[in-house]
Every structure is written in structure tokens, then in C-alpha cells.
Image (cartoon, helix red, strand yellow):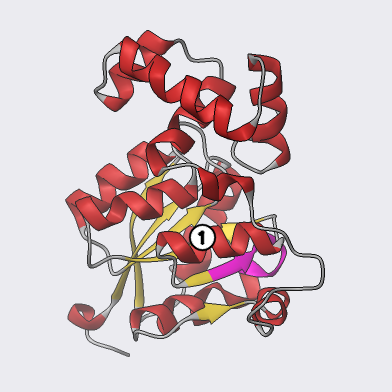
Amino acid sequence: MSPLSARIRVLIADDHALIREGLSELLGQYPDIEVVGLASEGNEAVRLAGELQPDVAIFDIMMPGLNGIDATTALAQRAAGVRAVMLSMHSGYQHVKLALAAGARGYLLKQSASREIAAAVRAVRAGKRYFCAEVEALLSDEDGPDGAEVSPLQKLSSRERQVLQLVAEGRSSAEIGGQLHLSAKTVDTYRSRMMQKLGLSDIAAVVRFAILHGITPLQ
């Protein structure tokens, strides 16, 4: 058994309690891994990462408030030493590339997580990358699979993606401003710019786009 001081400290963030607690129980069976925190949404996950400074953070790609991709980006400011593993139902090329661009060191599909999560945690902690077989196949071609297109989300800044998600979740400009520490007028500017870049004409189109591209779950 590894000494307690050598344990890999892990934070798990997923808005589904069953997955969050199941992964925690599973990882808790390994003597070299210690789950130090659980979060149910993205902003809480980033805050806990800053406070707890785990070795590895496991982020669901689609969480309320702040999705896993933007939570990974936020780690650079709050907890730069934490390595992120993305957990997702999406195996599309666009999702994977966005996650890697944000700084994720691993990417697992939820259906394979129970088999691979411990190996992913150990590999990422050791400075390596870890991808499930489906994602590895996608990444084997540097140009992407035939017909792969650049995600329209890449047109947006991290802040614009955050505004997109919160608008799609039904938040007002004042509510978004309070969460992001911006004025409502500034939020309106981000929202207008985001909609223009994506060619979206109204809030209903924003909601459809966010659901289609895995930014927010279908409620």
C-alpha cells in the first residue's frame, strides 16, 4: 500500500448525484487514490479546486452554471497545478478538440468510466494523457475524421461561452452579471456579440444551439 502522503487527491464534479457518488465510491476502493471533494456544478467545482488543490479534477462536460470545458479553462487562474479529466456522453470530434484546447489531459465517455477512471487518474497525475478507445481513434488522425468541421463554439471567447450557457439556462442579464461580476450592460454586449457570431436571432435559437452543442442539458 502506498503511503497516505503519496495518494492521488481527486475532485469529482458532476451534476448527477448517482454518477458523482458512484465514482467516489469506486475510486475510494483504491489505496493510492483519495477523493477529497465533490461538486454538483461548474462554479462550485472551480472554487473547490482552488481551495483543495487536488492533483486531478474529473469534470462532467455538461454541468449547470459553468460547463466542464470552461471550468477547465478557469483552473488556469484558480488552480493551475490541477490536471483535468473530462467525463462526457459526447464523443464528437468538436467536443474533444474543445476540451483539449481548454487544457484537459484526459477524456472518458461515461459508459466506459467505471472501467477506466482509475487508470485515467493515475496516468494524468503522472503527467501523461489518457483517452478512452473511441476518443483515441478520433485523435489518431491529426486532421480529424472525414467531414469533421470546426466547432462554431471556437468562434467564441470563454466569457462569451459562459454567457451563452447562462442565457440558455434562462438567466437574466442582471443574474448573469451577478454571477460573472459584470454589469448587466456588459452582459448584454457579450450576449449580442455571441448571437451575432453564431448567427442566432432570438433566445429560443440560443437554447436550441446550446442543447445541440452540449453546452447545457435538455431539461
- Quadrant of the rendered image containing residue 65: top left
Q: Does dot 1 land on a helix, a strand or a loop?
A: helix
| Stretch of the chain drawn in magenta | 107-113
* Vertical order, 87 against 204 (above or below): below
Q: Is residue 1 above or below residue 102?
A: below
Front residue of 153/53: it is 153
Q: Position of residue 152 (x, y in %)?
A: 62, 46
Name which residue lies at 51% across and 51% down. 21
Asked whether residue 157 is drawn in magenta, I would say: no
Tell me where residue 84 appears, x and y as whole percent: 40, 64
- Decide if residue 155 is on the left or right side of residue 12: right
Please provide percent x and percent y for residue 78: 21, 51
Q: How many marks?
A: 1
Residue kind at label 1, given as amino acid type: Ala
On the image, the x and y values in percent for residue 29 come to 47, 73
Query: Relative to residue 156, is residue 131 drawn left or right?
Result: right
Q: Residue at x 81, y 65 (%)?
A: 147
Left or right: residue 145 versus residue 83 is right
Task: Identify the residue shown where x is 32% and y is 18%.
Answer: 186
Quarter of the picture holding the C terminus: top right
Query: How many residues crowd around disc 1 within 10 Å: few (fewer than 14), some, or many (20 or more)?
Result: many
Closer to us: 196 or 87:
196
Q: Residue 108 lies in magenta, yes or no?
A: yes
Determine the residue positioned at 41% across, 25% down: 190
Q: Residue furthest bottom?
A: 1
Q: Quadrant of the N terminus?
A: bottom left
Of 198 and 12, the residue lying toward us: 198
Q: Which residue is labeled 1 in the image?
A: 99
The image quarter containing residue 209 is top right
